[in-house]
Amino acid sequence: MTPDAQATALVSAILLPLLGAFGVQILGRFGNDNARDAWTILIGLATFSRVASLIEPVMAGARPALALPELMPGLGLGFEVEPLGLLFALVASGLWILTSLYGFGYMRGHYEKNQTRFFTCFALAISAALGIAFAGDLVTLFLFYEILTFSTFPLVTHAGTEAAVKAGRLYLGILVSTSVLFLLLAILWTSTLSDDLGFHGGINGAAPAGLLDGKIEGHAAALLLMLFAYGLGKAALMPFHRWLPAAMVAPTPVSALLHAVAVVKAGVFTVLKIAIYVFGIDMLAKDGLSDILMWVAAITIFAASIRALSLDNLKARLAYSTISQLSYIVLGAALATSAAAMGAGMHILMHALGKITLFFVAGAIYVVSHKTAVSELNGLGRKMPFTFGAFCIASFSIIGLPPLGGAWSKWFLVTGAVDAGELGMAAIFMLSSLLSIGYLMPIVVRAFFRPLPDGVDDSREEAPLLMLLPICTTALLCFVTFVYAGSVYDLLAPVMGLAVGSGS
Amino acid sequence: MTDAVTVHHAATEALSFRDHLPALQVLLPLMGAPLCFLLRKAALVSFFTVAISFACLAISLTLLGQTMGGEILIYEFGSWPRPFGIEYRVDITNSFVLVVISLVAAVVFAAGPGQARRSIPVGREYLFYSAALLCLTGLLGVTITGDVFNVFVFMEISSLSSYILIALGRERRALMAAFTYLIMGTIGATFLLIGIGLMYQMTGTLNMVDMAVRLQAVSDTRTILVAVAFVIVGISTKLAVFPLHQWLPNAYSEAPPIVSAFLAATATKVAYYLLLRFTLGLFGAALIFDQIGIDILLMPLSVLAMFVGSIAAIYQTDFKRILAYSSIAQIGYMTLGLSLATEAGVAAGLIHLFNHALMKGALFMVAACVMWRMGSTHIDVMRGLGQRMPITMAAFVAAGLALVGVPGTAGFVSKWALVTAALENEAFFIAFLIMASSVLAVVYIWRLVEIVYFSEPETDFEVKEAPLRMLIPTWTLAGMTIWFGLFSGFSVEVAEAAAKQLFVGLAGAGA
């Protein structure tokens, strides 16, 4: 592709979901539901194909870019595709198609109201997520970060009940105030240190140098790093994590795509991006700059896992599991070694596939049997074998067992911890794996090995095909990513300072 | 710096029409006001007023064009040179402010007639328009003049006419609000006059440039220190700097909406300009910051204004009161810019002057639209208006986002400039406080968004969209908050050049 064609693909990837949102509104009002939903899928496929068309040039070392008019003299907006962002964009746009299919089944099976508004906001959120993925500098990233927060608010409060509105306020309150108080401040601080706010470098085998390298040090640098980490409230670092369990009042497709993939990954993706491009891995490793962040992430991993063990509500348990897993990525960034950063990057993909499957299953159970508590799942595996089979596979991937994708990311994370000489952190990863067995496996065991409650027949009662298909696809993808992890490695290697092809 | 400045003395050369523009800027609305009496008929008068305000806009844009390169225009009335005559002195700073005033006047007055008919007895419209034109005259005059006593005179013209305009509000409370404003405004003006008198006593001139030059010799006398105090307190009252802000919420919320839109976007901006002109221009940065340390006083007051204004805004139940309290906070941002005592800080203040005029003007116009259709601006009548008045409410969201400071809006540019200026001073805590107060802005704006979009209307009678005549001005201002958020080159460059010129001081600029 020529640079122009690449830039076109980049822009159309961000604009297509907007067009999708517009079309959903029109078709929702004047057409019928089938046309509206077909349109969503069509746009989803088109968006994904645009994003996918960028893989080849980016792996060849190109950085498709587009500059927008300057906001202020010297403060330009722009997009630039780099490997990490491309991976995030692939995950978000690819899983959007599956979630849309699943969403049609869920929303119809559940006779939800305001479906048009729902799918409109969904498309807007995806556009914002792609904007974050392709943002060429901190200001553009901040802009789309805020759009993502606001466009997902109507989705969180979809039910319209008092509880939903309250949860929505908490959601918005934490995400907006952290971003304005800490993130924007951190960006402004960075701008006084460095004239350039762009994400550059990582093309010819050397890891990006980092904008701030040599410009700030000691406590000030550690403070700036923490401002960034806490400013990215979407990464759900403790104690700013409560919005995520609160957001579980949303319909399950929202929890699945947004609160297991797009929104939360936007947070950790940005943490990783800032660690690599703004600070630079080398700078983070110096003088224990990232020690505080490392410990905050480690505590979050551990505490959230413990909390997940104690929760009976399935979605809440998954939410805390997400909080814990997100901090894997933050910890990977904070360890500041190439292998750990690679593990963190891979975990964006691997955790997304696993966790979205788990949420899909939770929604399927809810639609079929209206059960939300773990303790009510006894014997359900016999009625829904495919659904719970997928749950089991995805759980193994989250735990990190081969032959599933999650095994690779955990492998690199642990290797990275050992490289950094942080054996304690390696132990945290191991401990967390044990804990995730503790909160995920009982669900599988209950479903398959406990008897059904009295008076319930064990006839098959799977979720509608529109829901079952995405569930099985994402579970299958957990296998596929194990086999093709090498390609992911090759994609990410240049920005981590690793040689292409030196992985698996 | 001084040799780069070209001073253009209009009086010393053959005069063309173009050279008379500074005088026309003020004389046009001044002559227009009595003409309103003669025209009488409502439709005619309104057309006439709008025509005059657009002419003022054209003049101010021309003046800005002429002074953009750092040139200074001097217009001597009756060709009497100073110190004998009164002179108008146009540089980039006040031509920038002139553009803001006349722009808002032109846009807001265009929506005027319909609004006036609702709040003013039939047959008395011409009184409203002549008061409005007099107010415009006063504001433009204060800004353009190069004579300190002239400043006082024009300030009184604008104040007296604005008391009339505010008293036109629907409720009887408007009279009380106007009266409070009158008392506070008069005290402020008196303080200013006392200050001017003391300075005149020490320097023997009323011309700003002369005075600035002569002040340098006597700047350490007690008389001048007292004069500085009187002047600053007097202007601060007009500017509604915390804790001299009590008149503002009532005045802005009880006035007819169109008047609120006009005054909120212009009156305090002119006061801010005056503060800069007197402190940096007349007294000079050395006296103000190094000798007196005004920044030490102004900074905590600004921060308090930011928080008190925003927190009070959160608890109001009337849309216009929310906006009024928010203005107090926004004025805090502007004075904070000055208190940083750097060019970047003053530039940030000026950028915010421009941007805040646009967004507050737009928001008060939204309030005018709501008032027009619902007869009230209580937040309960705004329930579910998102569906009923979608175009108006979209303007509310656009301007509201700007007030919060979301990227892509003018408010972000202000915030960026202000926080960067604070960080350059290594005032990290101040930067953090600016952020914290903008979180409060999120709260009071989002509270309204929830009411407008996510709640059901209380009544089910049909509500139509606001008339086009009001939507166009509303969206002109709202659109500009977006435009100047995306293409802020103009506002930022002008403000930076103006700040640079201000810091040179009138004494340093010569001429």
Image: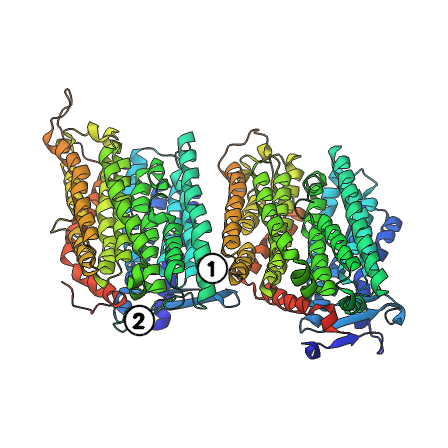
Q: Is residue A434 above or below residue A195?
A: above
Q: Quadrant of the C terminus of chain B?
A: bottom right
- Residue under the point 39% across and 55% down: A223
Horizontal side, residue B349 vs residue A333: left or right? right
Using residue A215 as the reference point, say whether residue A407 is left or right of it: left
Three-letter code, disc 2: Ala
Residue B136: x %, y % from top left: 77, 54
User: Which chain is home to disc 1?
Assistant: A
- The local crowd at label 2, few if under 14, some if 14 to 19, many if 20 or more residues have their Cα within 10 Å, is some
What x and y, as percent, mark residue A404? 14, 51
The location of residue A285, given as percent across then percent down, is 28, 62
Q: Which residue is mark 1?
A: A188
Residue that appears at 73% across and 51% down:
B233
Left or right of B192? Residue B93 is left
Pointer 2: what residue?
A62
Residue A254 appears in which quarter of the rendering? top left
Instruction: Tell me which amino acid carries mark 1.
Output: Leu
Q: Is residue A173 visible?
A: yes
Residue B323 image-quadrant placement = top right
